[in-house]
Image (spheres, coloured by chain):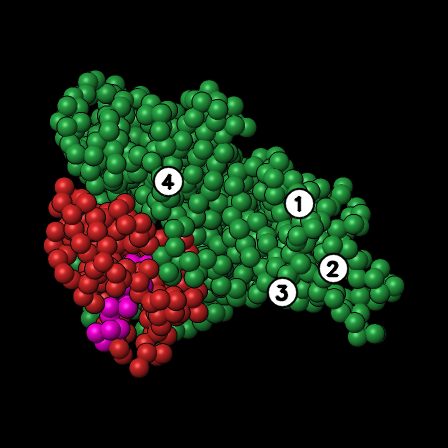
């Protein structure tokens, strides 16, 4: 390990985020200047006291570009005002898990980031102690300064950078006591706020390069079709069009501006042939009911003797829940820039998985991954859609065929009709109660479409019911599907939490008391393995009950929901009031346990946004199909929630000092259930299908 | 193709484009003003909102030929130093998540406050409901419009 300073400017303390010790690594600043050493992950301290921290994970709105550097700066005791954060590009030699997905970045990197900051801080302290000839233990740090209290001396990090660079980094490092955090837990504003509010080119779609061509692509108009023939004469004759090229089942119109290309694309004459069933939504409903009873089920979890429990039950409750396909609808549609050259490839754009983008482009170009660069732009939302690399592959294909730098742009219609959706799913729940209203048997069957396992078999109430059977049936659909924010649980949580409400009512118990009884049972006499933390779940339930004044409000109909996903626990109470004879969801109270809250402002946003997203899609989100083609292709047909339709969202975080877990997804799953259960209280009508607006009980309401 | 001379952000800029080209794409592809965003192309989401003679319009459905002598203001020209009360409020309230829709939200809010410096809650909600935020930052958008209004004379 060595650290090199430059003549002109301070200390580069590179740290290896993938190294479990996260200690500073050798970075020769001269080599950096000459571009000889490739590194993307570093903390640099300039002699001018500036601190630069690179954040390697893609920023799609989850706030990672602010939160990650906060953790480093905390352990460094850096003055946040002097910190500049930079988005790292793809570099698998330095970074690990450079992915935005699964709400996993914070739990993965928490220790690594802390050690990186703490190690740098240690070296700066040692440099000051050596200068002052005092013991290290007498020095402290604050606001980018090392202080010796006894003598009143202090030196800034910028002044110490050179000296610190000559020291050997420690092999072991002590982290701060969490109680002494100053920056973590504060409300820190999004680091890109000013650039966003002034319209700076931050996003993939904003990337322009001299000589770049624009490409729009016509993909098969229905799932199950294959390209047969193309007549592009009329398109090619349009102004600004450079060429029309074909690859796989796609036809790319390439030209000099987006609008010219868009107009020309409309003139393509394409014939397709059928290669699979052209499914309509009516087919899906039929497939669901056939497979629910006659499908081949894969057992996911089995505890006790479920058949005996149902035979001996005093009461059996049974209900089915279904949801439609959903597009992700990030407001920035898919796009990517590619320049495929003889000696390498340059890729620039919005991707949640830069490494996958590179791997896929290496495959189709035959160019080695190390000769492919990926610059990650800020991204106008992702919601899981940018985990795929289809749009990057397209850009590489077109650039390779055109031998030119190309940006592929998806129109909104392309983005909505272009595939990779949250798949439709149908669940059947069955519960067996004994005479005292105790849940003695539980069955769940999920029928999914390209879901693999459409259940989460180890989630609550598993562990709390002695006799339980969870299985799933799969249908392979030609409609392409993929992860959508909180995959599976974005609907399963709603269905399960609504059903548990039904069971609690049948048992004659308060919905919260009923859940708490089950959790106490799971604690005292667990049925099989329990893979969630019972106490943390109980704590959020109690916090939500307390903050919502559960059951004690006049003229307010409350519905409860709680869910564990992505390592975090979220309980929600939905509150419906009757206004002019109609039920209106006025408020959602959320109790959240994601461990230590890194950025209070950003975390609050994630929870509110997750609730709005959950309620919005549960209420309005509906994608239907006719002969393999989506019926909705833009926001006039596919309805997204708007400001006038949102409830207030009141957020409370559990303060338990546990290492932080993800927050990009966990607030979404419980939202639909909290709303539907409150709606039931107000109207005595169950909402068993999404979107709610199509339910009979909801007609005339929204 | 025809040469259009446009008054944008108090400058005269020219673009040689077909007359049906939406103002949005002239701004982005021809003039390098990429702060104005493409979201839907059919005036549903509001990401492309700019001011035409001070009024909020959807630049994705305004053909360049219809602009004429009207003064166009984009997010880049809303203020010289990024310090319009709405821009400042957006930072203070920490509105953005992904940030993609926010230029359009800011332009919509700025036009509202120009017309009604002290809007009621209902006026804020009904005006801002024309713009989609897929991240769901609506609570803070509302709050930021109020903050901006409180600081506007």
* Circle on res. A604: none
Which chain is painted in green?
A
| Residue located beneath label 2 in the image | A160
Q: Is residue B67 left or right of residue A201?
A: left
| Residue located beneath label 3 in the image | A79
A667 and B69: which one is in front? B69
Chain for disc number 2? A
Q: Residue at x 51, y 53 (%)?
A: A65
Which chain is painted in red?
B
Looking at the rendering, which quadrant does residue A585 occupy?
A: bottom left
Circle 2 crowding by C-alpha within 10 Å: few under 14, some 14–19, many from 20: many
| Residue located beneath label 1 in the image | A29
Asked if the residue at tag 2 contacts the one at tag 1, i.e. Cβ–Cβ closer than 8 Å, the answer is no
- Label 4, label 3: how far apart the Cα atoms are: 36 Å
Q: Are marks 1 and 2 on the same chain?
A: yes
Q: Is residue A603 left or right of residue A617?
A: right
Is residue A172 something that shows in the picture?
Answer: no
Residue A436 to residue A250: above or below: below
A339 and A176: which one is in front? A339
Q: Which residues are magenta?
A: B102-116
Magenta stretch: includes residue B112: yes
**Comparing labels 3 and 1, the label whose residue is closer to the camera:** 1
The tag earlier along the polypeptide, 3 or 2, is 3
User: Quick one: SS at disc 1?
Assistant: helix
């Amino acid at each position: 390990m060595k650290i090199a300073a430059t003549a002109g400017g301070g200390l580069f303390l590179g740290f290896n985020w993938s190294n479990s010790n996260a200690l500073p690594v050798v970075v020769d600043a001269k080599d950096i200047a000459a571009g000889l050493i490739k590194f993307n992950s570093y903390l640099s301290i300039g002699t001018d006291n500036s601190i630069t921290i690179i954040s390697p994970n893609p920023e799609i709105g989850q706030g990672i570009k602010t939160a990650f550097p906060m953790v480093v700066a905390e352990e460094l005791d850096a003055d946040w005002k002097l910190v500049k954060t930079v988005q790292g590009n793809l570099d698998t030699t330095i970074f690990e898990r450079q992915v935005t997905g699964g709400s996993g970045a914070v739990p993965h990197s928490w220790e690594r980031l802390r050690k990186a900051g703490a190690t740098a801080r240690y070296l700066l302290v040692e440099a000051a102690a050596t200068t002052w000839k005092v013991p290290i233990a007498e020095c402290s740090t604050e606001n980018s300064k090392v202080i010796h209290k006894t003598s009143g001396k202090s030196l800034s990090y910028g002044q110490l950078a050179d000296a610190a660079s000559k020291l050997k980094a420690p092999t072991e490092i002590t982290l701060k006591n969490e109680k002494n955090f100053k920056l973590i837990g504060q409300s820190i504003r999004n680091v890109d706020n000013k650039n966003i509010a002034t319209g700076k080119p931050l996003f993939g779609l904003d990337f322009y390069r001299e000589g770049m061509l624009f490409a729009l692509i016509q993909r098969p108009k229905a799932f199950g079709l294959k390209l047969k023939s193309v007549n592009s004469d009329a398109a090619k004759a349009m102004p600004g069009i450079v060429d029309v090229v074909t690859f796989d089942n796609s036809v790319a119109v390439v030209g000099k501006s987006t609008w010219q290309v868009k107009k020309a694309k409309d003139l393509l004459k394409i014939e397709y042939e059928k290669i699979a069933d052209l499914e309509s939504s009516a087919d899906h409903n039929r497939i669901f009911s056939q497979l629910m009873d006659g499908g081949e089920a894969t057992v996911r979890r089995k505890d006790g003797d479920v058949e005996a429990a149902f035979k001996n039950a005093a009461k059996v409750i049974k209900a089915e829940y279904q949801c439609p396909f959903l597009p992700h609808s990030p407001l920035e549609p898919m796009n990517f820039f590619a320049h495929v050259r003889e000696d390498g490839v340059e890729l620039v754009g919005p991707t949640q998985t830069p490494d996958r983008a590179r791997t896929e482009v290496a495959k189709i170009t035959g160019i080695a991954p190390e000769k492919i660069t990926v610059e990650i732009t800020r991204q106008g939302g992702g919601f899981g859609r940018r985990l795929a690399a289809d749009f990057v592959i397209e850009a590489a294909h077109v650039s390779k065929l055109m031998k030119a730098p190309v940006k592929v742009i998806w129109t909104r219609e392309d983005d909505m009709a272009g595939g990779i959706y949250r798949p439709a799913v149908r669940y059947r729940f069955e519960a067996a109660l004994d005479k005292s209203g105790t849940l003695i048997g539980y069955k769940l069957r999920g029928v999914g479409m390209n879901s693999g396992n459409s259940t989460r078999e180890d989630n609550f109430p598993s562990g709390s019911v002695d006799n339980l059977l969870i299985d799933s049936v799969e249908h392979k659909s030609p409609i392409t599907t993929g992860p959508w924010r909180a995959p599976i649980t974005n609907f399963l949580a709603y269905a399960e939490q609504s059903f548990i409400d039904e069971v609690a009512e049948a048992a004659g118990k308060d919905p919260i008391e009923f859940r708490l009884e089950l959790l106490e049972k799971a604690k005292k006499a667990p049925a099989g393995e329990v893979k969630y933390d019972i106490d943390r779940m109980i704590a959020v339930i109690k916090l939500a009950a307390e903050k919502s004044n559960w059951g004690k409000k006049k003229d307010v109909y409350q519905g409860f929901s709680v869910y564990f996903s992505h390592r975090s626990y979220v309980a929600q109470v939905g509150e419906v009031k009757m206004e002019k004879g109609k039920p209106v969801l006025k408020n959602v109270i959320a109790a959240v346990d994601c461990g230590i809250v890194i950025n209070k402002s950003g975390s609050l946003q994630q929870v509110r946004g997750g609730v709005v997203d959950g309620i919005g899609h549960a209420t309005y989100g509906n994608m239907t199909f006719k002969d393999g083609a989506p019926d909705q292709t833009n926001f006039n047909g596919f309805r997204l929630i708007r400001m006038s339709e949102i409830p207030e969202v009141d957020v409370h975080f559990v303060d338990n000092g546990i290492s932080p877990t993800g927050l990009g997804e966990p607030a979404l799953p419980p939202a639909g259930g909290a709303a539907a259960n409150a709606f039931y209280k107000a109207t005595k009508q169950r909402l068993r299908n999404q979107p709610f607006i199509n339910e009979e009980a909801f007609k005339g309401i929204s | 193709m025809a040469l259009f001379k446009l008054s944008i952000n108090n400058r005269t800029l020219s673009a040689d484009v077909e007359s049906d080209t939406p103002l949005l794409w002239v701004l982005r592809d021809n003039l390098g003003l990429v702060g104005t965003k493409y979201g839907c192309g059919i005036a549903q989401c509001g990401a492309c909102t700019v001011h035409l003679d001070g009024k909020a319009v959807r630049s994705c459905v305004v053909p360049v030929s219809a602009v004429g002598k009207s003064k166009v203001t984009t997010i880049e020209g809303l203020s010289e130093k990024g310090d319009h009360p709405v821009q400042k409020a957006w930072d203070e309230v920490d509105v953005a998540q992904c940030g993609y829709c926010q230029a359009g939200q800011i332009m919509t809010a700025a036009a509202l406050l120009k017309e009604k410096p002290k809007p009621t809650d209902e006026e804020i909600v009904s005006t801002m409901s024309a713009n989609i935020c897929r991240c769901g930052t609506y609570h803070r958008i509302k709050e930021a419009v109020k903050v901006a209004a409180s600081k506007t004379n």
